[in-house]
Image (cartoon, rainbow, N blue to C red):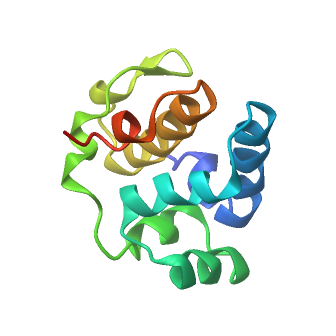
Amino acid sequence: MAAHRIFATSFASIHPLYVQKAERKGRTSAEVDEVIRWLTGYDDAGLQEAIADGRDLEAFFASAPAFNPDAALITGVVCGVRVEQIEDPLMQRIRYMDKLVDELARGKKMGSILRSA
């Protein structure tokens, strides 16, 4: 089976779209970066490096320092599909990231987005 086209999409092309979505709803670029760092374990420098070097989403997640084990707590629907039922691990991680940004844009509290007690 052929890989999804989204896997070859660069993180650098997706990140500004996430920021625009959040900013339209009154959130900030820093908050977008915070939820992405929480999910992937990247620090600020690592996230900026991933943007600068143009790595695709497959490489972005493959080189993520520490994917958050609490990501399994992310539930809901993205693009008509329940994220907890996605079988492909890479697609699921991409949709987790989409879901976090959606929650941010919808105005959820950061503690709730980051699945903290």
- Where is residue 92 shown, x and y percent of the image? 38, 41
Please tell me which residue lies in front, 51 or 19. Answer: 19
- In the rendered view, would you say 86 is above or below 92? above
Quadrant for residue 82, please give it. Answer: top left
Please tell me which residue lies in front, 63 or 32. Answer: 32
Please tell me which residue lies in front, 27 or 76. Answer: 27
Query: How many labels were placed on the picture?
Result: 0
Residue 56 lies left or right of residue 71; in this view the side is: right
- Where is residue 47 shown, x and y percent of the image? 56, 74
| Residue 1 visible from this viewpoint | no
Q: Residue at the location (80% across, 34% down)?
A: 24
| Residue 105 visible from this viewpoint | yes
- In the rendered view, would you say 84 is above or below 98? above
Q: Which quarter of the rendered picture does the C terminus lie within?
A: top left
Residue 35 lies left or right of residue 32; in this view the side is: left
Q: Which quarter of the rendered picture does the N terminus lie within?
A: top left
- In the rendered view, would you say 109 is above or below 11? above
Residue 29 lies left or right of residue 44; in this view the side is: right
Q: Residue at the location (19% across, 53% down)?
A: 69
- Where is residue 38 shown, x and y percent of the image? 38, 58
Q: Residue at the location (57% across, 27% down)?
A: 107
Residue 53 lies left or right of residue 91; in this view the side is: right
Quadrant for residue 44, please give it. Answer: bottom right
Residue furthest out toward the top? 80
Q: Residue at the location (39% across, 48% down)?
A: 93
- Where is residue 100 shown, x and y percent of the image? 48, 39
